[in-house]
Amino acid sequence: MNKPITNKDDLEILIDELGLKAVLALIAAICQEKAERAKVVQGYYSDPCRQFMQAGARIRATLQRIEC
């Protein structure tokens, strides 16, 4: 990948190259990292921290159910 991901087509290419589970795992990892950053900057109980923690957990749960 030489150019940044900017749209649906780019995401589709990533899914084709890496697989759906790998892309979702990356998104879950990004959510975790963002939650950690929000926790440091805004606190554990801040809305961004909780939202990213919940999103990452839901994506990881979805990964367990996906068969591809």
Image: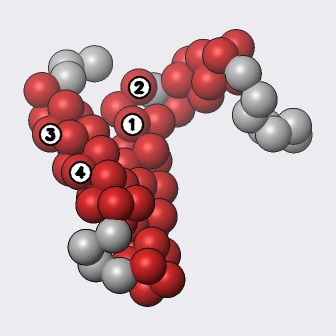
CA separation in Å, label 2 and label 1: 6 Å
Q: Residue 40, labelled with which disc?
A: none
Q: Earlier in the sequence, mark 1 or mark 4?
A: 1
At label 1, the amino acid type is: Leu
Q: Residue 41 at x, y = what percent?
A: 49, 83
Q: Residues within 10 Å of mark 3 (few under 14, many from 20)?
A: few
Determine which quarter of the picture holds residue 14: top right
Q: Is residue 38 above or below residue 59?
A: below
Location of the C terminus by quadrant is top left
Q: Earlier in the sequence, mark 1 or mark 3?
A: 1
**Marks 1,3: beta carbons within 8 A:** no
- Name the residue carrying label 1: 24
Location of the N terminus by quadrant is top right
Disc tally is 4
At label 2, the amino acid type is: Leu
CA separation in Å, label 1 and label 3: 11 Å
Q: Earlier in the sequence, mark 3 or mark 4?
A: 4
CA separation in Å, label 2 and label 3: 14 Å
- Name the residue carrying label 2: 20
Numbered disc 4: secondary structure:
helix
CA separation in Å, label 1 and label 4: 14 Å
Q: Residue 42 at x, y = what percent?
A: 44, 79
What residue sits 12% from the left and 26% below the top? 65
- Name the residue carrying label 3: 61
Left or right: 68 as drawn, with respect to 11? left
Judge by depth and name the residue closer to the eye, 45 or 30.
45
- Name the residue carrying label 4: 54
Q: Is residue 27 above or below residue 67?
A: below
At label 4, the amino acid type is: Gln
**Marks 2,1: beta carbons within 8 A:** yes
